[in-house]
Amino acid sequence: MTSQDELESTQLPAETEAALERAVESAHRHELLFSERAANIKQSAVRDVFDISIRPGLVSLAGGSPYLKSLPLDDLGRTAERIIAEHGLEALQYGGGQGMERLRQQICDVMAAEGILDADPADVVVTTGSQSAQDVAAKVFCDPGDVVLCEDPTYVGALNTFEAYQVDVQAIEMDEEGLDPHRLEQRIKQLLSEGRRIKLLYTIPSFNNPSGITMAAERRQRIVEICRENNILIVEDNPYGLLRFDGNPLPPMRAGHPDDVLYLGSFSKIFAPGVRLGWALVPRHLHRRFYLACEAVVLCPSPLTQMLVSAYLAEYDWQGHLVKTRELYSERCASMLSALGQHLPDGASWTRPDGGFFVWVTLPQGVDTYPLLYQAIDAGVVFIPGAAFTPSDEPSNKLRLAFSAVSPEEIEEGIRRLAPILRAAIEERSSRN
Amino acid sequence: MTSQDELESTQLPAETEAALERAVESAHRHELLFSERAANIKQSAVRDVFDISIRPGLVSLAGGSPYLKSLPLDDLGRTAERIIAEHGLEALQYGGGQGMERLRQQICDVMAAEGILDADPADVVVTTGSQSAQDVAAKVFCDPGDVVLCEDPTYVGALNTFEAYQVDVQAIEMDEEGLDPHRLEQRIKQLLSEGRRIKLLYTIPSFNNPSGITMAAERRQRIVEICRENNILIVEDNPYGLLRFDGNPLPPMRAGHPDDVLYLGSFSKIFAPGVRLGWALVPRHLHRRFYLACEAVVLCPSPLTQMLVSAYLAEYDWQGHLVKTRELYSERCASMLSALGQHLPDGASWTRPDGGFFVWVTLPQGVDTYPLLYQAIDAGVVFIPGAAFTPSDEPSNKLRLAFSAVSPEEIEEGIRRLAPILRAAIEERSSRN
């Protein structure tokens, strides 16, 4: 069975055939019950290759998992033991919907390290991962047909979230300095002239997922002004802000603009995704509705994992851990850039990120990277095709490579496996011209 | 300051006044950005009294928190230590969106104990608490204006969830045997004759929150048939199913009806809410969309808390713990019923639940229990006014009392404090006639 078959077929054991028949029979009847938005809820392309990419021997440059091996697991285990043994009645009980006050204070310290110096714990809502905050933002602000602006390319999870709320996601091409304020302004003008309602600008200004591109500092200020002038709320998603390889983090767009930006942070990349904790720093005038909507979705974030993160921030050298992992990601990024330079054919280009997890490869116009995925899997390497990261249904000549979760040796080997596939595709494309 | 002031005022420290002014200034501008559904997102009445009810000396009969003191916290701490020390790279990393396979298998064992013998782990989705599953059900099935049927009274969190999706929640009065099939059928006919789209019946058939009422076994079968005939999906919320005081759990509506019922379970009442884990057992023909919508909201449930629950189910006598807590809840319920009988005035009546956490008190027609809450707080006891548990905006002559989280002595004292307030309200009402 080839990988394509594997991706596209679903094999059911014989004993479930009766159930399948029942299901098919009743499918029609219940299909009528789905909401209009349900048609927009689709499989993430990242998940498409999730099962495939954990096959032994395969080099996965697909998933953007953080490196966890440098966490002091034995110590963290003892910390969790103490939390449950000594504070179990709090850790295992329901908690407040906004999150624990101590953790919200510590989150303000984390944001201070990111460059936001005026955050008030009262304006923070702890969320079940940053994804949940995105979902709530879409829920609270977007009616069907409303426009959300974003970078092209952007985070696939955000695209799926906005599309699930029947939002018209308008992606604006970036250059090497990120979103271009002029282009943004033009698009806003055009949309407004068409009578469209623009609600949000969703942006990942630092080390954009998937492109690795960072928005230049001077553009940040200008884009805040443009959005303010047009009454567009900025949703700034900054999971990688503290993972800049060299120098201090760039000040987020939220820094100095408390009323203009809904800021989203995450513990997934600076600590661990398994605790499923992120946060939103919400402009005060929007806080109550946002918080109530968060509470309506999950009642409260897990007190147990909140207390674990709180202890990690209080008792461990979390900034020292960040220094170590930043160095490691920097090395891995360098390995990837070096392997790309060594192995990739003429006609391929790629970004050179200053932080984060990803490199974005561009092939010549006309090459579609989606079918190349199946060839790559057969060759023992996985990536995410670029089409996943844009609302358009057009084929894409881009692909995302993640260096965060693989060793320099695996990166080298993965690129070595990938290169001939890209070379053949480029040659095949040229021969068609 | 009286309690009413405390509930209704918000005091800001002087130093935040400038921020407040900024916020008020900009409030108008961003108010335009809220979605239509945002207007329907409101504060839960249960949360209204959350802060109040943790004041020292107050007896809270408000919150339905489970009893956790009988959990083996030291052992659970060591289990968590082992999970992180030995499996931390899995526990702290991203996991699959559907939840871990081992836990889904164990969830099928839990459901077997509840009376569902044919559940397949492939049809289970682990969710961030049962609340999240309700949110996803509303998202996947309900367009604005669609009808969801429910019991009157019903769980306030479900009401908030459905209303946030602009659903028309139609509550159908129960008698002492739960939802009346005849009344249900009449309401369906009426709504269909008005051209309304009915999508779901949301029901808590066992030990309904807030009333404690249980739907009779013979009614369950009939209600499944009525819903099937009318192509209405049943959302069966069964967090208390295993907390029946005597005898075996009643078979859920899902038992024997795999295609008709979306079944929601929770670890909050049989283990601990702090892990924020529940599950949905989804009819196979609806599974894919439901699962994708869950994934879009949180990416994955916490692998760390999933592994803790999985270890609890595998290595601990979870059924023995249930037997112990059921006895305790039964005793507390008996204490409450006894105290009500001893202290409450003529004209008040109440339910006699066979399980769960709640007793539902009915006062004479014309008494509004909401203003009584403030008097009760001043007298040192908290309850939830009945109006919270119905979509109607009418005043309610009911109130919910929770016995799960308070000792028999506190229950007795709480009812002793509450009784004169109810008596005065009833007398005042009579004198008006």
Image (spheres, coloured by chain):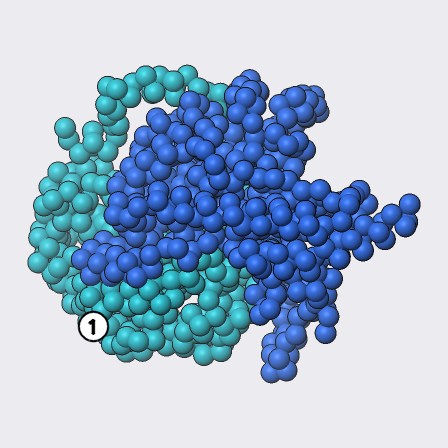
Chain colours: A cyan, B blue
Residue, disc 1: A324
Say if A354 sits above or below B18 in the image. Answer: above
Looking at the figure, which quarter contains the C terminus of chain B? top right
Residue at horizontal 85%, vertical 53%? B428
Residue A70: image quadrant is bottom left
Q: Position of residue B6 (x, y in %)?
A: 68, 69
Say if B250 sits above or below A197 in the image. Answer: above
Residue at horizontal 56%, vertical 30%? B215
Residue at horizontal 66%, vertical 65%? B380
Say if B286 sits above or below A238 in the image. Answer: above
Left/right placement of residue B232 relative to residue B7 reads left
- Count of numbered tags: 1
Specify whether residue A49 is in view. Answer: no
Residue at horizontal 69%, vertical 60%? B417
Left/right placement of residue A299 relative to residue B415 reads left
Q: Secondary structure at mark 1?
A: helix
Circle 1: is it few (<14), some (14-19), or many (20+) Cα within 10 Å? few
Q: Position of residue B432 (x, y in %)?
A: 90, 49
Residue A8: image quadrant is top left
Looking at the figure, which quarter contains the N terminus of chain B? bottom right
Left/right placement of residue B380 relative to residue A29 reads right
Image mark 1: chain: A
Q: Position of residue B132 (x, y in %)?
A: 46, 46
Nearer the observer, A127 or B80:
B80
